[in-house]
Image (tube, coloured by chain):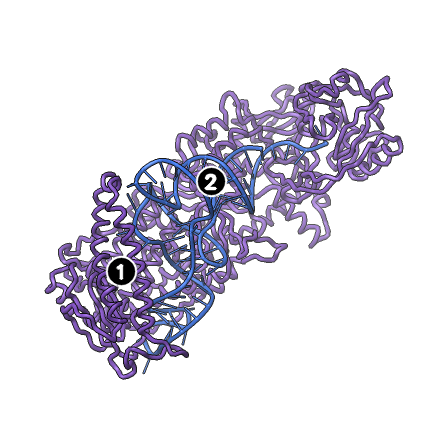
Chain colours: A purple, B blue
Amino acid sequence: MEKELPKIYDPKAVEDKIYKRWEESGFFQPENLKDTKGVYCDVLPPPNSNGELHVGHASGYTVMDIFGRYNRMNNKKTLLLPGKDHAGIQTQVVFEKILENERGTSRHELGREKFYKESYDFCIDRANYMRSQEKKIGLSADWSREKFTLDPDVLKIALETFVKMEKDGLIYKGKRIVNWCPRCATALADVELLHKETPGKLFYIKYPLENSPEFVTVATTRPETMLGDSAVAVNPEDERYESLVGKNIILPLQNRIIPIIKDRRVDKIFGTGAVKITPTHDPLDWQIGKDHNLEEIQVIDEKATITDLGGAYAGLSVSEAREQIIKDLEKLNLLEKTEDMTHSVTICERCKTVIEPLTSDQWFINVDAEKFSLKKKAIAAIEKGEIEIFPENFKKILISWFENLHDWCISRQIWWGPQFPVWYCKNCGEEKYIVSLEKPAQCPHCQGTELTQDENTFDTWFTSGQWVHTTLKSHGNDFDTFYPSTMMVTGRDLLFFWASRMIMMSLYATGKVPFENLFFTGLVRDKDGHKFSKSRGNGIDPLLAINKFGADALRMSLIMDSAPGQDSRLSEEKIETFRNFTNKLWNISRYCLSQENFKLEEKIVKKDIKTITDEWIVQRVDETNQEINNLFETKQISLAADTLKAFTWNEFADWYVETNKIEKNQKVLGYVLDKILKMWHPFMPFVTEHIWTLVNEKNLLMISKWPQHEKYSHINSSSKGPEKFKLIQEIVTNIRDASFAGTNKPKKEVTIDIANQKQYENTEMEKLLKEQEHLIKNLRTGVETLKIVSTGKIIKDAMHRVVRDINIYVAPATGDFTGGTFQIADGIVSQKVIDIVKAEKEIANVEKYLAGLNARLENKEFMSKASKDFISKIEKSKRHNDAKLVELKKHLSSLK
RNA sequence: GGUCGCUUAGCUCAGUUGGUUAGAGCGUCACAUUGACAUUGUGAAGGCCGGUGGUUCGAGUCCACUAGUGACCACCA
């Protein structure tokens, strides 16, 4: 292999080509994989198809792709199923803004049908762009199976679930208090709201008693709702109001007679202890109203203006009405006082408009129905461990969320999304609705033919909550092959929105959990821990990052130093360090490829292993292989990458490649590189595939077999090669450390005294050191002459190190080092002094450590209770450190 | 008010059945560079693992309490 390879790896030049090769190979499609054993399926979370990918998506996709590629290489029939979500309200908000800003029009001007069609085209357009971004990240998904939540086949299956639920009595329609967004003109689920602490005022209003000059004072932050009051409530245990309960009040401004009632839910401490009850415009009041049979008077409409029932205030906006009412109350001398307070205002998660609670006709799912309790089934499945959750503690959070789950409002009044498969007959009215996927030819009750469809659209999570089975069911027999899927990776911010609903909905629709593993990623934050946001302008565009540093570097920076469910930080500097690592791997490979007759070797045999260095690296690569496999099985990919990086850089590159320059062995080099490339492939698919291609043009690394560790079968266990190499490593490190580290000049004269070593027979040790002399000299130690002696005598004017009972003396071999004193940097420093300080420090360390060991060995309880293995370790360590201490002390006194 | 995190080197973070002297990256300091790699190499400095108490022969790791910090849920008339 004599190719001239560039010194610097250029991701831009190769990534697109590699992706194209993967795609054209057909191996993203599971049916093209040969000799598979077992199945791996990850139905990817569909991003909202109304924008572009951000680093959060990139982070999720990286995790999904790592697991996907690992399993594909492990012979699993692997499917990563991509898709896009129509994202009801969010897309409608985004697209309405575009209409307004770019075309100066609105959805009302377009009309429902046209708006729907244009929204659809917009989503498809965005989806196409986003798909190209997903490919840039290296996602090995089967694009031939890509789905959209509004694809007719996918949607049909989702709507069938609604039909089934209706039949099973899980669906009901009713007038309920809902969270109404006046801007979006739709009801919202609790989970679609945000609460914002806002400064406001608390108004104390005097309500006159009927036939009495007295007043009851109520406190409210929303005086405009008083127009719809049906009662004043007090706590039954509130002595102040005991005598008033049962009496009536003349509601000011409206002059309506309303009762004073008692209810336990009233807080005695807050305000005056008396609270006005407006059942149509407050969730708690609605509950109280139901229980006390109070009148429901809707005074605020769906545009947040006062209705005709609001009397004189009809037509005013909520804020105008508030202002006017306060003025009027002041005139009537009914405003007792006003207090400043901070209270939490509920706003729309998507458009940040203040929510008006109001009663409205909506469709609900009973989450605790008799025939099938969605929440109980979900809790049972989780408790039985049918889904393994990472991190584990999210299990508790999820269960307690299910326990407190209220009925789910699934109808939205927006235009963008699937309409309810519900039909009304003109004659029979809305009471007798008909549930049917197709428009019925005639009304089953009266045979009338004038049928209209319910105008409501589904909550986005109703369809996306069924994503796993609707996508699989709409492609051949994928459902039978892949369901339940193996893995779901999603952001921890979607725990309640999506993960929870998938579990409920899939259990209902299929009787099984949707996935066996549920893996949460944290939020990706910026360098300072802030969320990425457009307004902050702190975003890292994944495409720009890929362009600058390469997809592999971005992938690595997104998964390293992170734990499931835990937020992580991303910065350009972090991506840069992994770009550097990518380049390191490239250069390691470049060195290998420059060797004569270099080939990647999947297997080696005993005779290929020639030196103790070979034995060591072969053992270490197998150990690393085993560790990585274990970490993958326990989903600890960050640790796996970390372990692999340490091995690749600190052992393979820094030691084996260095020794390989001194004693060539292409076989072992090829063997280790083969394993490393395979193990790195899930993390850094592009650079590994590119290197692979340079050596092996026929097969793709992507579908090569994942290495299984060899249990060191090719190492002769009696030779102790790995252990011996580690000793040489220590000797080399200590010689480097003993003076001018890493320099070749000045030259050193090194004496290794083995008189006191107890590790091997002296002859064996001497043989080892003589055999490895070339390494000790050439591994950047600057050793000119190496003497191996067995005298036990201190050598003066030399720097001394003790390595496992072996004494090493490093002395100058040239005139530059006269008298053990020489120049460092710009000051005159005595190397002897440095050495003394160092020796003293080391002695102190060893003594301290020995004290700890002795304390244990003298402790009867320790000796009787600790494991034998551990005790013998301690004993061994004591012997070693005792000897070391003796040597160090001897040497220190000779220095002085 | 409830739940769940987090607190380990200057910074960002790993550390999964408790086990010898706690790790990485970045940053800092010193030195090196015809070398696969200046996107590099060799070294160094830097920690009472938030605090207190407990369990244990042994605690960064388990338990209790506590402080700081963050997220989520609920309530907020």
Q: Position of residue A893 (x, y in %)?
A: 25, 68
Query: Who's the residue at 14% across and 69% down the image?
Result: A791
- Residue A757: image quadrant is bottom left
Q: Amino acid at mark 2?
A: Thr
- The mark that comes first in sequence, 1 or 2, is 2
Please give the residue where the numbered disc 1 appears in the rendered image: A672
Residue A483 visible within the image: no
Q: Position of residue A471 (x, y in %)?
A: 47, 40
Please give the residue where the numbered disc 2 appears in the rendered image: A471
Binning the other alpha carbons within 10 Å of mark 2 as few (below 14), some (14 to 19) or many (20 upward) gives many
- Asked whether, in this view, residue A669 is left or right of residue A159, the answer is left
- Residue A260: image quadrant is top right
- Classify A623 as above or below A171: below
Q: Amino acid at mark 1?
A: Val
Q: Are marks 1 and 2 on the same chain?
A: yes
Label 2 SS: helix
Comparing A395 with B13, the one in front is: B13
Query: Who's the residue at 13% across and 55% down the image?
Result: A718
Q: Chain of mark 2?
A: A
Q: Position of residue A404 (x, y in %)?
A: 54, 29
Residue A22 visible within the image: yes
- Classify A158 as above or below B34: above
**In this rendering, which labeled residue sits more in front, label 1 or label 2?**
1
Comparing A142 with A635, the one in front is: A635
Query: Who's the residue at 13% across and 67% down the image?
Result: A766
Residue at far right of view:
A331
Q: Chain of mark 1?
A: A
Comparing A315 with A287, the one in front is: A287
